[in-house]
Amino acid sequence: MKHLLATEGLKYHDALAILDTAEEMAAVTSREVKKLPTLRGRTVVNLFYEDSTRTRVSFEAAAKRLSADVVNFSAKGSSVSKGESLKDTVQTLDAMGADAIVIRHSAAGAAAQLAASDWSEAAVINAGDGTHEHPTQALLDALTLRRDWAAAHGSASPRGTDLSGMRVLIVGDILHSRVARSNVWLLRTLGAEVHFAAPATLLPLGVEHWPVTVHYNLDEALVAAPDAVMMLRVQAERMGGAFFPTAAEYSRRWGLTDERLTVVQQLRLGETEAPALILHPGPMNRGVEISAAAADSAQTRITEQVTNGVAVRMAVLHLLLTGDPR
Amino acid sequence: MTAYLITGAKPYGEAPKDLLIRDGIIAQVGESLQETEAEVIDAAGLIALPGMVDLHTHLREPGREDAETVETGSRAAAKGGFTAVHAMANSSPVADTAGVVEQVHRLGLDSGWTEVYPVGAVTKGLAGKTLAELGAMAESAAAVRMFSDDGQCVNNAQLMRRALEYVKTIDGFIAQHAQDAELTAWETEHPAQMNEGRVSATLGLPGWPSVAEEAIIARDVLLADYVGARLHICHVSTKGSVEILRWAKGRGIQVTAEVTPHHLMLTDDLVATYNPVYKVNPPLRTEADTLALREALAEGVIDAVGTDHAPHPDQAKECEWAQAAMGMTGLETALNAVQHAMVETGLISWRRFAEITSTRPAEIYGHSRQGRPLEAGEPANLILVDPNARITITPENHATKGRNSPFRGLELPGQVIHTFLGGHQVLHQGELTISRSGRSAP
Amino acid sequence: MSHSSETAQVMAASDIDRALTRIAHEIVEAQRGTEGLIILGIPRRGVPLAQRLGAKLGTIDPAFDPEHSLGALDITMYRDDLRTSGARTPEPTTLPAAGIDAATVVLVDDVLYSGRTIRAALDALADYGRPAVVRLAVLVDRGHRELPIRADHVGKNIPTARHERVTVRIAQIDGISPEAEEVVINR
């Protein structure tokens, strides 16, 4: 693995290596000295064309805990409006000695283009490209799910286990969601079954080619007894009536409301007694896609997702930046 | 003017003949011709074809001379085997006045590597609001007959109806770039980027639905029928469009259509590389579309090949997909792609090749000296092609300024060896010679 | 088990067991008991060796409680060859709940060679606490040190050439029967 661009095509053993490494990284974050010397003298550039403080801070913390030098390069707005092309920016960063470039961009494919180009020798990590993919988000979701799934099934450690047999329901704006896209491929690779619940306007044409079961009705989807429910954020700009009539109607039909929370509370992890899980990539619109009670329920793993984000990004940086003879 | 005796060439790929070219016309076609005054061209193994006619070319001048000029585009045409090209109106300023079309016409004559026919805009500034001065352009020195807002669709149905009616009075026709603006979120923050379907779903790029093309074609054939006007459909790209055209032609509606070489050969799977060289409008479609387009072209539902040659400077393609310019070069690869997709698949003969690349496009425009048969007394617009050559497409070797060929690195069949423009040899052994106006290639 | 002429067995299963027994006795002797003693295996083969040492220590001194005195110390993230060796998935580090401060830590590994692994282990250890004493026990010392590091307890000193490879095969790691355990030199 030289780059991490997408979960589509990510091999099973690579995915497991990232998750297993992340488990050990998570252990580091809970000890007294939260720093490892692994990437001493290496430079990680966070190249962010889109604002995302959450993701940037997570990558920054991950790199720093591995003792890497971190350069934050915020190129807000498109490269066109900024006047400097992606190529020129990347070549500049390369000349500064970047060992890894973490790129967040509003244009789908920006990370892949960077990796395919001869603009830089650096390892490329996709931190979200348009509505394409956000692989580290899917990996941290998988890490979160795997820990509960393994524990419920009596494994002493989640190491080496996958999500075989797990049913994950992803709800909401699939069409515009890079998180959903990355999750579909990774969850399938790890052996989980993926369900979608969304209005047809928020599902991509072509979804019939994906290895998922599509429901237009959230209540019917919950009858299929998912082990985890992942609520996607509804972007404010979609609420203008073009994709669904109103936020209130969306909430009634596809929101995790208090009424639906009572249904989710009855769900269990597989055949075990452990309760089913609720995930959300954040930031949440409380009262729109998820009720306050659901967001704060004991079944949610939202803060664990954030914590696991640092561990997963440490794992990815470690695996991409060590042992790759160039 | 030099006379040429072409020996042993196979007209339309059929039995070998000698052709004598003198005073700008094919003087004789026969066996064992003798002419001591003529320069002899040994064409054994080569196929003689009428010079190709491209109804759809972007020469970029005036305004985007960094991308292409009439001169460089004309050279590319000569190298690609085209003896006539039709320069689309989306230059800067737009070719929506007699002044601009006359300028392009004049630049074409000055360059002299191919015949350049300017296409006039349908609407002022391609803005889709009011009709451009169609009559003035028709009466200008450029004598424009073809009008198109290509690059933009004439979306307003009322305006399209009026345009179709108006050009009847000047014996012209409208070439429509069929693309519903709303369905493709045109000129919004997130416009359509690629064919909508399996691949776009995975890549997360906004989809350009096939129905956005088909809905406009359906509307426009009905309008053309209603007002009794001539309509040409640019770069047909979907299977559904083919079905609508088949229906329309069956009803006797005066509609013609073209398809690009790249839509005959390439599919949207290539977009998975996110390499903007594959970004084009209309977008690359699916294999099912490609196969339907080939069949339609073979049987005549689609009349002609139009290259939609669209050169761009490197920086317009060396950027994020969403920001990259749309379009591909095509003049110097059209023969290769069409031979590969149509002739080598056994779908068409070389005689049909001549129809779709020369005869029909010339008829659609109404040319009298282009697209003519290879017979004695006809204008000597012809090419000699080596069908057995196999070349690796190398855009750096092209005469166009654009390096944005989607065929880069592919090995494709065929090579244009000689091009005669009105009896003047502008291409010899694959190399540009001296243009009809006396210019030499760099 | 038969070997090609390029491979020579230098320790059999019984030799390994005897060596570990001897090391256990040496530790107790050097330590004058087992109080405050923590045994940390270095993954991967150091971990089962440390567990066996722990069991033997418990036999020698019933006061020794393996459950609270055994652990594993992964050194992957502290290696000095991370840029050139293959990317590795770290193994778990598990330490006694009481921590390692002021304890006598015995690091256990299978083969002592350049000393770089032990250098990394000492760095890792420092990030977990401050032991009073750190000692090193290895099954095999094959020489060729590149750092000023030596073992306190050695199962067997095996003189080798640099191009030779020493392979320790342990039931828990290599999936062989306990009787088939061995140390071999590949020439």
Image: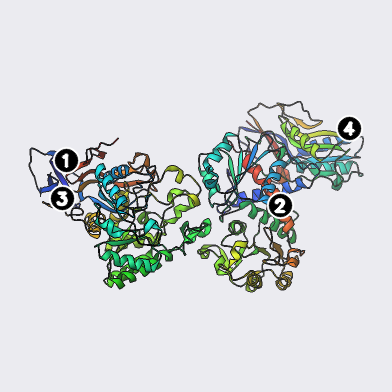
Residue B379, label in figure: 3
What is the quadrant of residue A232 in the picture? Answer: bottom right
Secondary element under disc 4, as helix, strand or loop, is helix
Percent across and percent down for residue A35 are 75, 41
Q: Is residue C92 above or below residue B349?
A: above
C120 sits to left or right of B267: right
Q: Which residue is mark 1?
A: B42
Are dots 1 and 2 on a single chain? no
Could you tell me the amino acid type at mark 1? Asp
The residue that disc 4 covers is: C30
Dots 2 and 3 on the same chain: no
Crowding at mark 4 (Cα within 10 Å: few <14, some 14-19, many 20+): few
Q: CA distance from mark 3 to mark 1?
A: 21 Å
Q: Nearer the viewer, residue B301 or A24?
A: B301
Nearer mark to the viewer, of 1 and 4: 1
Quarter occupied by residue A246: bottom right
